[in-house]
Image: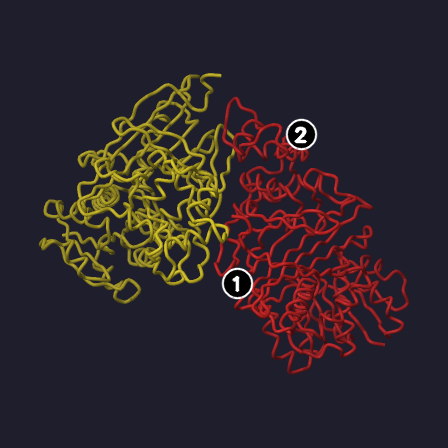
Chain colours: A red, B yellow
Amino acid sequence: MRHILIIGAGKSTGVLVDYLLNKSTEEELRLTIADKDISHATRLCNNHPNATAIELDVFDQKERTDRLKQADIVISMLPARFHIEVARDCVELGIHMVTASYVSPEMQELDSEAKKKNLVLMNEIGVDPGVDHMSAMRVIDKIRDKGGKVILFESFTGGLVAPENDDNLWNYKFTWNPRNVVTAGQGGAAKFIQEGKFKYIPYHRLFRRTEFLDVEGYGRFEALANRNSLKYMEVYGLENVLTLYRGTMRRVGFSRAWNMFVQLGITDDTYQMEDSKDMSYRDFINSFLPYSPTDSVELKMRLELKIDQDDIMWSKLLELDIFNDEKKIGLENATPAQALQKILEDKWTLQPGEKDMIVMYHKFGYELDGEKNQIDSTMVCLGDGNEQTAMAKTVGLPVGMAALRILNGQIKTYGVQIPILKEIYEPILKELEAYDIRFREIETPYLGYNALHL
Amino acid sequence: MRHILIIGAGKSTGVLVDYLLNKSTEEELRLTIADKDISHATRLCNNHPNATAIELDVFDQKERTDRLKQADIVISMLPARFHIEVARDCVELGIHMVTASYVSPEMQELDSEAKKKNLVLMNEIGVDPGVDHMSAMRVIDKIRDKGGKVILFESFTGGLVAPENDDNLWNYKFTWNPRNVVTAGQGGAAKFIQEGKFKYIPYHRLFRRTEFLDVEGYGRFEALANRNSLKYMEVYGLENVLTLYRGTMRRVGFSRAWNMFVQLGITDDTYQMEDSKDMSYRDFINSFLPYSPTDSVELKMRLELKIDQDDIMWSKLLELDIFNDEKKIGLENATPAQALQKILEDKWTLQPGEKDMIVMYHKFGYELDGEKNQIDSTMVCLGDGNEQTAMAKTVGLPVGMAALRILNGQIKTYGVQIPILKEIYEPILKELEAYDIRFREIETPYLGYNALHL
């Protein structure tokens, strides 16, 4: 039996465990699922004979290394900042490791040591990052193999509510960490390149510089720029690309409405408000509007945002009940972003039985034999219920598939890796299709940034 | 002879030196002016028999302490971050010290040791902070002495170009550090309190939440909120005040126009642009606008900012020549703010002979015998030419006056001080009047935030 240690029994771990347990007899796998709360781990084991739940304090070095020593491969499903200690132990003890998180500088430092010991430290193999890398590199390599030159790459991902449960005016519900949604785009200007020109968008304009994307069978979406697209020049070997733009997908109209919050300043996560605990939703909103002895919060808000009462934007605000004078924020020393999250969670929390959706859209422009061409690649993954969410599937499955392939010696490139090599993405993308996670690649006329009708 | 050591022969030091040298015979003063470039110090000495110029590297501890030992008082006119080493030496060696800068936490730590040794470390005794503290505390103490209770305090200062040289569309020229002007308001939301309600304004809305102020003889100004007004509750002992608001004054229309830069994101000082050295002014602006194969930078700018060609805002942009395709930014690895500063310096640099102006406006609302009253206190100081600028006078004179009074034992409150005590502000405000720096205090009906016409 080969021994897989999975640390962290969070949201995406269920799908991962099911995938591996289904293969456990045939592949001779023995799983240990570790969590600081053993009940989470026990639930995921589901009494399967090849799975054991254990309690593990990942900060207890002795306990951690004792557990690691028994494993042939470790999968860390912990929050990203906790991977590094596990990774250092893995390199020390000669154990492979898999995570779905971005490669941190500390992780990268382990590269040469891992190579020396013939170890794979596979990272960024969830959905975004992960499935995006794999599906993009498949097309980029295909273009290169034909002798083409990539001149444009745009890539968009959205975690959204499935159409059947898309029933609020914002066309949005929280399908992953709400905090990341509220603070999305903060921490610096968005940077990208279009037709050879570097472009910068400040946070407070980000939600007004969207573009539309149509996905067959799913209608129209909008996309807003991610923070730094430029680093993907190096990651994907696209140093001479003219356009490189990565973004986040939402349903049309979300960004325009979210911009109201940005403009008010209520997405700010950098300072604590006075007296946030006893503040009503209405008080909270009023803190960002000018004082008036006579005008209502509603009137001041409409003037500040320059919207009429019959504007759908106004209806979106009312739907969130943000002018309620009785509901309290109820959080000590809350930042504006934390208070806003509280208000949104009242309305945007996915209810039992409701389903999520992951949408991905890549555009590749390339030159071949003097002609410009374009490939559009799209993927939609729907959740199947509360455990088998689209998010859990698109994270948990590629993680499991990568772990098994490393264990079986099918991934032979050692060191700190991300899934951009053919030996990794080709079989995994193929296997994902069995789980209905498939990309539809179509050749279209090159659209790029041509002016079609002057 | 008493020995005064002045470190740093910068912009405001000339007025300070002239003030002290004029008193040097009568008061038996001997001045040493130290600068890392001795020529700056020599020029300020102006061959006066009571002044000596020396070269001093303030980071050379031996040289620094050798010089300090010979002084009875030290005035540091260095940039704020360089005061602390001098201050520590002063406390160690038992020498008084004066600066015009905000008290840093490290400076505050010297308080008890300075008190033990009967030393005065006087800070924040320039114009803002400085003259603002003194003129505000005089009125606040007057209200308290009558038995009144302060319910509102608003305080505004502006460093502007004098009316006779106010000849561009922005009604603005750089009269002090341009960098601070370009980045003003950044680094967190503005915080204040109005009628008992805490209010927050994010940076990108700051320049749209102005109020008007009329100064007799000088017309109308506008004010925008400073970053954190709340800390003045403690500084001025106004813990129960209902309104506390500090701001910066500009001529009307400046903020609305400056907001165009804020909206574009070109005041950002947190990241370096690609290829800033060879970038034209036009390229720079275009980096913040969407790509288009056909539309001009001008058209995109007007659409982005939603302004018409005959809007005065547009004329203000053209006046700065920001669409010029030949003028280069010429700075390596410039932040957007640095590039913008370069463009503005072409047009907003005070020319030889041009004069500056300092304007200050305080409003005090108070309750006395059940009635609400208001005092408005205003001050305008005009520069007299290139050396005797309003900025240099309003900084250099109170610094000199405080130093002399400490030397003469007329300031008896020891420790780390700011000029909020009567023994300090009363004689200094009186002496400043001889230099035409005087406040006009008028009683007016309480305006506060009453709704006058519903």
Distance (Cα) linking label 2 and label 1: 53 Å
**Of A189 and B65, which appears nearest the observer?**
A189
Q: Is label 2 in a helix, a strand or a loop?
A: loop
**Where the N terminus of chain A falls, by quadrant?**
bottom right
Of callouts 2 and 1, the N-terminal one: 1
Q: Badge 1 sits on which subunit?
A: A
Of circles 2 and 1, the one toward us is 1
Q: Position of residue B198 (x, y in %)?
A: 51, 34
Q: Position of residue B377 (x, y in %)?
A: 31, 28
Q: Which residue is mark 1?
A: A242
Image height of A118 relative to A304, above or below: below
Residue depicted at 54% across the width and 34% down the height: A305
Lateral position of residue A361 relative to residue B119, left or right: right
**Of B421 and A429, which appears nearest the observer?**
A429
Image height of A288 relative to A451, above or below: above
- Using the rendered view, name the quadrant where residue B244 is placed: top left
Q: Amino acid at mark 1?
A: Leu
Image height of B10 relative to B190, above or below: below
Q: Amino acid at mark 2?
A: Glu
Numbered marks: total: 2
Q: Badge 2 sits on which subunit?
A: A
- Using the rendered view, name the quadrant where residue B402 is placed: top left
Q: Which residue is mark 2?
A: A326
Q: Position of residue A345 (x, y in %)?
A: 70, 42
**Of A9 and B47, which appears nearest the observer?**
A9
Q: Is label 1 in a helix, a strand or a loop?
A: loop
Q: Are marks 2 and 1 on the same chain?
A: yes
